[in-house]
Image: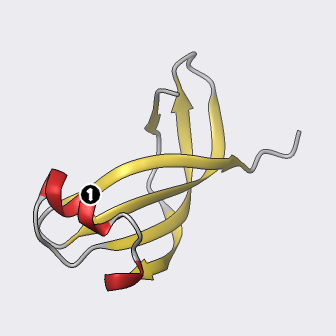
Amino acid sequence: MYFELADEISDIEAIAKGVSVRERARLRKQFGRGRWRKLKGVALVRLGDGSLHRAEVHWCEAHGIGRRKLKIKRFLDDD
């Protein structure tokens, strides 16, 4: 599903750090060495059809490499 962030991510918290990041070997191979962390937060996202939704997003990041593998885990809209 294509989406882009329409606003800053808030309520950021770490899910896993260091050896606890299960996909660390793949991240290292694809993006390089770093102190990889898996994080989650809440953001306003714009979907491919142009609609805006509040969603919980998860991603991995490392210092000097930045945010990678951003994905929507669930929508938080009260519908």
Is 54 on the left-hand or right-hand side of 5? right
Nearest the camera: 14 or 34?
34
Nearest the camera: 10 or 20?
20
Spot the residue most to the right: 79
Is 63 on the left-hand or right-hand side of 20? left
In which image quadrant can residue 47 be found?
A: top right
In which image quadrant can residue 31 be found?
A: bottom left
Image quarter of the C terminus: top right
Horizontal and vertical percent position of residue 3? 48, 31
The residue to which callout 1 is attached is: 26
Horizontal and vertical percent position of residue 49? 57, 15
Horizontal and vertical percent position of residue 19? 34, 83
Task: Indicate the colouring scheme.
Answer: secondary structure
Secondary structure state at the residue bearing disc 1: helix
Nearest the camera: 4 or 60?
60
What residue sits 74% from the left and 50% below the top? 76
Residue type of the residue flagged with mark 1: Arg
Label 1 crowd (10 A; few <14 / some 14-19 / many >=20): few
What residue sits 25% from the left and 59% below the top? 27
Horizontal and vertical percent position of residue 11? 56, 72
What residue sits 45% from the left and 69% below the top? 39
Is 50 on the left-hand or right-hand side of 4? right
